[in-house]
Amino acid sequence: MATDKYDVVIVGAGPVGLMLSTCLARWGYKIKHIDNRSEPTATGRADGIQPRSLDLLRNMGLKRKIMEYEPAKVYEVAFWDPSAQGIHRTGTWASCPKFIDARHPFTTLLHQGMIERVFIEDMEKHGTHVQRPWTITGFKNDGADPVYPVEVKLAHVDGTLSETVRAKYLFSGEGARSFVRDQLKIGIKYKDPISNVWGVMDGVVRTNFPDIKMKCTIHSDAGSIMVIPRENNMVRLYIQIASSSEPDFNPRKTATAEDVQQKAKDILKPYTISWDRVEWFSVYPIGQGIAERYTLDERVFMGGDACHTHSPKAGQGMNTAFLDAVNLAWKIHHVESGFAPRSLLSTYESERKLIAENLLDFDARYAKLFSARLPSAGEVAGASTSSTDAEENEFIKTFKASCEFTSGYGVAYNPNTINWGPSHPAQHPLILSYEKGTTLRTGRTLIPATVTRVVDANVVHLEQEIPLNGSYRVYIFAGNPSTTHTALRDLAMHMATPSSFFATFLKYADTGVDRYHEKHNPHTGFLSLCTVFNAPRSAIEIDDMLPDVFARYRDHVYADDVWDQRVPDAKAAAHAKMGLDEEKGGVVVVRPDGYVGVVVRLEEGPGTCEALDMYFGAVTGRKMGGERAAL
Ligand SMILES: Cc1cc2nc3c(=O)[nH]c(=O)nc-3n(C[C@H](O)[C@H](O)[C@H](O)COP(=O)(O)OP(=O)(O)OC[C@H]3O[C@@H](n4cnc5c(N)ncnc54)[C@H](O)[C@@H]3O)c2cc1C
């Protein structure tokens, strides 16, 4: 019998595996996805979706589905410290303070199973089903088939059935205990000797504790506890049962549900608490570990908890898993579409491992911040303002840096081929860098901006307008139309050169498929284009003001005419927020996963296109612009 062949075999249907599967299924890949549990997560586990992840889910059209479950939303965190009466509130602060320009400045709390369900339904719509309860029993990258070099052996968990398939890629999203990682003999490096045992309880409670609907960190003489509100009137309590920082640390120390409830009662005094129902209880030992490699051959990859484990305190497990998966998904897509050389795949490990290292460092600091030292009331008040006059001590600085990190907006990738930097192969005088012509930073998310869509006068969020479709997003901030008319014409003209960044991948040109209704990718899956004018909507006539190639993206032509309180004096707020000249504009290239790749000045002549050709030439490994080299 012929061996079945797949683009990707995905092992594990937790957040990382499901996100990868969802992206690739949408983009048309053939996937074999297995999980060794007979049912998806029913209760418990991770529950926090951070603001940046919610942006991502919205960009995938999945936010609405998540919100249908009516999750709890945490806007503020309350801090409680010991007092003569038991405990007292020392202050509250925003969970995503105003200095972070976030569309959704809250944490969304919903149990992992519901979140998984949203992904599973979406994958199924695109023809991918999770095969359960199946496990992986072996694999090798033997190259026996050069297109499908990886052989994967799979079996039903009861051993009654087995199959051998071939794949272009194998992905382990197996969680902390990974068969694939073990087989590859990839070690876990423990960053910090601290390891903790946590008691986690989800339930419906009766209490007179006033902040039960808020996220709380409570220190009392009886111990510490974290309170997290949840969907369906539930509340999650985290109690640290053991820590290696204690002299008599025992990693096998455990606790019963009753022990945890009694401890919660003692900590919350003088308030009372009792349980109507306990939905989930677990004792969850965790070490701060990071896998030494995320891949050895860029065919077999790992992500999520298989690569990094940390305390649940900052609610980062699932969020980091999502971002691992999206990072890998678009890179596989670009390599398999012929848009990028295989070397692009090496940036998965270099980018995501750095983030995991930052996360582990942060986790250690966070634990110290909240466990070792109790913030004073004055510090708590200071940390919740965006005032730069307030004297900033270490605690406030750490808090601010942490908020950026925990919200997901602090994720910053280093310069490499896709994130332009001073050592990038593309060096052109029109390329702008941070605070030198733009406020955008490569390797960071695009700053959010509100604009008016010209075709239907809808006020929209620019950064959400192009869905997560695997394409680069090219935003042409076109300044004042009368100033930039020639620059736009020149850019369009040079883009028509057969070897330009635009024309190189004009894949759809000859397919004969009617693309009349295609809004995002009428010419190529490589990129989507947007134009933003510094002009009132009513003054913009798309066909008169734009060369044909840009006018074709008529659903992506916008007026920068919406006032923004962050740049109150700007006439064109979106231009101003990006730090671009409001009159002359600029071009911003955003990676398919939403991070800025390069920013270029918009000028008359060939320069703007040349600079973009140089950037995309490095990204795609092709010679772009000028005379095309013979292949
Ligand atoms: C018991 C438990 C409690 C947790 N509690 C919390 C918490 O309270 N707060 C928090 O923030 N995080 C918690 N986490 C961690 C959080 O769930 C993860 O950070 C997050 O889910 C990471 O997603 P992932 O997809 O990498 O891994 P996971 O969600 O662990 O998913 C891995 C999946 O792979 C499957 N699998 C594993 N090995 C194989 C195999 N060989 N073959 C087939 N399938 C396999 C597993 O059954 C699972 O479905 C908990 C994790 C566990 C296991």
Image (spheres, grey):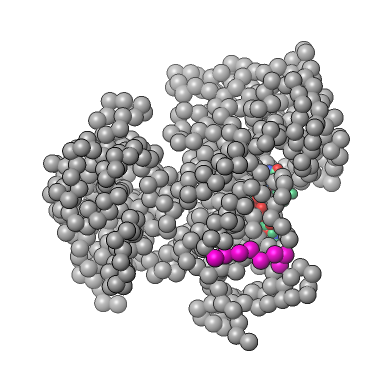
Q: Position of residue 314 (x, y in %)?
A: 63, 38
Residue 128 located within the stretch drawn in magenta = yes
Residue positioned most to the bottom: 1
Q: Residue at x 45, y 36 (%)?
A: 103
Q: Nearer the viewer, residue 270 or 597?
A: 270
Q: On the image, which quarter does residue 238 sit in?
A: top right
Q: Nearer the viewer, residue 396 or 327?
A: 327
* Residue 58 versus residue 260 in the image, above or below: below
Q: Residue at x 73, y 21 (%)?
A: 209
Span shown in magenta? 127-134
Residue 91 at least partly seen:
yes
User: Is the N terminus in the top left, top right, bottom left or bottom right quadrant?
Assistant: bottom right
* Residue 85 versus residue 258 in the image, above or below: above
* Residue 491 versus residue 69 in the image, above or below: below
- 455 left or right of 487? right
Residue 406 at least partly seen:
no
Q: Position of residue 513 (x, y in %)?
A: 32, 69
- 398 left or right of 11? left
Residue 48 located within the stretch drawn in magenta = no
Q: Position of residue 598 (x, y in %)?
A: 33, 50
- Magenta stretch secondary structure, dominant: loop
Q: Nearer the viewer, residue 5 or 284?
A: 5
